Amino acid sequence: MLRIHRSRRSLSRLSNIVRPFCTTQVSANPPKENVLSPSTTLINDQTPPVPPTDPTAKTPLNFLKFALFGALAGASVAGCYATYAYSLEEVDQKTKAFRASVNYAVGDNAPSLDKFQGLLYTAAMTVPAKAIELYLDLRSKIEEQVQGYTEPSSEKLLPDLHPLEQHVFTLVLDLNETLVYSDWKRERGWRTFKRPGVDDFLEHLAQFYEIVLYSDQPSMYVDPIMERLDTKGCIRYKLSRSDTKYHNGIHYRVRLKAKLGLVWFGLAVASIEDNGHALKSSLQPENCVPVKPWKQEADDTALVDLIPFLEYVARHRPADIRPVLASYQGRDIATEFIERSKEHQRRMLEQKQHGFFSRR
């Protein structure tokens, strides 16, 4: 009994101790806790400050960067100027001695100071010399690619004449607006028209000239027109855009060289602008016979009117055609030639009459 009584007293005391913790009432004055402020936490958790760097430590690196940038800029400017002012052969010739000086050799018996100076010179000049060689190599490859588009496809555009035809002149005929006219309309596309008298012109002059057709258009444009234009085979050869020299946005007719010299003893019939100036695309305007461009005028007779003059030149074969054409400068060749022919016939008739009366 005594044990039971003691155990009950112990349980009652324990219940009195636990009851305050199990009550549902909230205390009005909760116990204050010792909480650290956020600032205290940040200060305690902050990493130690990094010591300031010395600004003078980056000076050599910055100087090296600026020096490298300046060297590259200077090399670029020098390369651009050399490309603009000198040809590839001139640059190669002017820098040959400098590039050869890199192979500076000092004899075995030379003093150590001379050997050291030679080593320093070779090391200092190797980079510029290699840069020049790289520039020459790159420029050579670029110019080879550019020449494929700007230079004619072949240095010799026309084959040599037969030995029995060495006296024959070459007559180069411009295609566009001289022999034909191409017109485009939305409803039908491109159409090409033949100039009046072109068939008689080609057929008659083929007896006296080596006729060559020229156009600054691609071959895919010239070939179909030539097949329909020259049904009787009067035109021997054709020259298209691939046979021209491209410069400043213009496809120039190249100089056709004679077999025995630089003078081309031939004629080129080409249309001119309305202001009377010869075509800018000719590199040999002194050999050109200007013709008014044809734009579908039905009453045009320019080609037929030129036949007498061109036949006269072919029959008499002047040593140089340029002075002959220069005498017609500023005049219509066909009209002027007829007037000169009439004047010549009148003088010949007067001489015959004067000789007849003098004998009597």
Image (cartoon, rainbow, N blue to C red):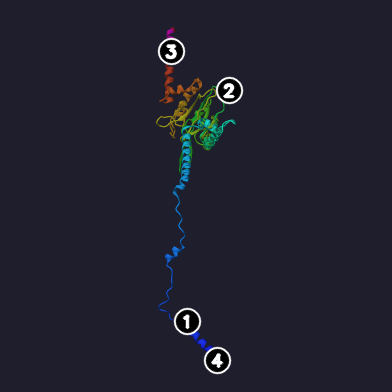
Answer few, some or many: residues within 10 Å of disc 2's Cα (few below 14, many 20 plus, some between 14 and 19): few
Q: Earlier in the sequence, mark 2 or mark 4?
A: 4
In the structure shown, which secondary structural element does the residue marked by tag 3 occupy?
A: helix
| Residue 305 x %, y % | 45, 26
Q: Earlier in the sequence, mark 3 or mark 2?
A: 2
| Residue 115 x %, y % | 56, 33
Q: Who is closer to the viewer here, 131 or 307? A: 131
Residue at 43% in and 25% down: 333
Q: CA distance from mark 2 to mark 1?
A: 134 Å
- Which of the labelled discs sits on residue 2, or is there none? 4
Dot in front, 2 or 4: 4
Image quadrant containing the N terminus: bottom right
| Residue 313 x %, y % | 49, 22
| Residue 287 x %, y % | 47, 26
Give the labeled residue for mark 3. Answer: 351
Q: Earlier in the sequence, mark 1 or mark 4?
A: 4
Dot in front, 3 or 2: 2
